[in-house]
């Protein structure tokens, strides 16, 4: 059994502090202290400065999430005072403990050094819908804490306002009734399957390998006698290559190929469906359309996948809580890059009401 260092080494729960967000002040429910990470320093034209980890998330001008390590001079990000331009992003030779805030705000966004930050809505909706259709689902999160994942899943699956979830979840009778109603949903005329279960496993960012996932699913199957139908990995870019493949180094194509082929091996070995997400090229963030060639460093992921979709959301769609899902690849069958329109309901974090656009 391999040993892993946990990302968080301490957690402080509190109800006395608040943090400013882009939608007002939000209560902080907990503060997590992490292991030491290499420090990155972000500076902007307006004089803002942020010391953070490489995978700290900020927001660009189109409201897309961006890792600090992926920013370049001249990029535009959101701040408390509006849009600001990146002056420099530098990796230092220092390491320090980082702190992650657990908020009661449904967006989980807050200002750090006056820069808007964020701590994968589509993947979790897929997981909930699959479980509601009677499938057992394993969610393997490589970035978001297990507590945050469970909070989102609870809001989605039990139809509870995410802003009220922390308080409502304390009412055991209410939650029990919600769960019983969920269990009984399979008794209807068209949905005869009892709902499946969702298992959540948190891996440390940069520590999750194909071997780790193999070991975890083997344990579920052999020790707990649980057969998983669908695995959701949130998400492939944050996984790492095991020590036996050091030759891959920093080659992003080879890393993507290794991880994608590894996840495909997992799906074949355990006879399950595996869903994950990757990033598109910066030039199409917030664009009206995305094509297969817009996945540069993750091209190997698309090449290995059986089915590949693009999630499209421009500024106008964001205003009206809309998404478009476009088919980019379908290994077993023909397609004409059909798109499907979806509504996003921020109250329950639900994506639904699909309309085929052709």
Image (tube, rainbow, N blue to C red):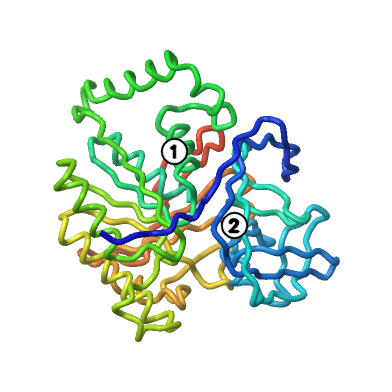
Q: Taking 310 as reference, is 298 above or below it?
A: below
Numbered disc 2: secondary structure: loop
Please name the residue shown 61% across and 64% down the image: 53
Counting labels gives 2
Residue 287 seen in the current view: no
Identify the residue at horizontal 66%, vertical 62% (top origin): 60
Q: Residues within 10 Å of mark 1 (few under 14, many from 20)?
A: some
Q: Quadrant of residue 51?
A: bottom right
Q: In the image, is 20 to the left or to the right of 28?
A: right
The residue carrying pointer 2 sits among few (fewer than 14), some (14 to 19) or many (20 or more) residues within 10 Å by Cα, namely some
Q: Disc 1 on helix, strand or loop?
A: helix
**At which x and y percent is residue 99?**
63, 52
Q: For marks 2 and 1, give the one nearer the viewer.
A: 1
| Residue receiving disc 2 | 314
Q: Nearer the viewer, residue 225 or 229?
A: 225
Name the residue carrying label 1.
150
């Amino acid at each position: 059994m391999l040993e892993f260092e946990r990302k968080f080494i301490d957690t402080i729960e509190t109800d006395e502090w608040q943090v400013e967000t882009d939608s007002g002040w939000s209560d902080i429910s907990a503060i997590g202290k992490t292991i030491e990470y290499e420090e990155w320093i972000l500076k902007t034209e307006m004089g803002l400065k942020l010391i953070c980890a490489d995978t700290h998330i900020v927001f660009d001008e189109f409201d897309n999430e961006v890792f600090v390590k992926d920013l370049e001079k001249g990029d535009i990000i959101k701040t408390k005072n509006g849009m600001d331009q990146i002056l420099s992003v530098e990796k230092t030779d220092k390491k320090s403990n980082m702190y992650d805030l657990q908020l009661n705000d449904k967006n989980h966004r807050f200002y750090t050094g006056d820069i808007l930050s964020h701590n994968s809505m589509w993947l979790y909706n897929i997981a909930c819908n699959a479980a509601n259709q009677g499938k057992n689902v394993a969610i393997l999160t490589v970035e978001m804490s297990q507590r945050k994942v469970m909070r989102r899943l609870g809001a989605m699956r039990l139809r509870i306002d995410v802003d009220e979830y922390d308080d409502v979840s304390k009412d055991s009778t209410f939650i029990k009734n919600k769960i019983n109603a969920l269990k009984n949903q399979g008794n209807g005329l068209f949905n005869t399957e009892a709902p499946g279960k969702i298992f959540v496993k948190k891996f440390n960012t940069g520590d999750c390998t194909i071997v780790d996932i193999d070991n975890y699913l083997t344990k579920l199957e052999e020790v707990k006698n649980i057969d998983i139908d669908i695995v959701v990995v949130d998400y492939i870019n944050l996984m790492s290559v095991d020590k036996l493949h050091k030759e891959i180094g920093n080659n992003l194509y080879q890393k993507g190929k290794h991880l994608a082929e590894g996840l495909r091996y997992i799906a074949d070995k355990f006879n399950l469906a595996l869903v994950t997400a990757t990033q598109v090229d910066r030039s199409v963030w917030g664009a009206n359309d995305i094509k297969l060639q817009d996945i540069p460093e993750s091209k190997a992921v698309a090449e290995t996948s059986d089915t590949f979709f693009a999630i499209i959301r421009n500024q106008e769609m964001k205003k009206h809580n809309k998404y478009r899902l476009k088919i980019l690849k379908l290994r077993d069958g023909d397609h004409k890059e059909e798109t499907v329109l979806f509504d996003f309901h921020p109250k329950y974090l639900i994506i639904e009401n699909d309309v085929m656009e052709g």
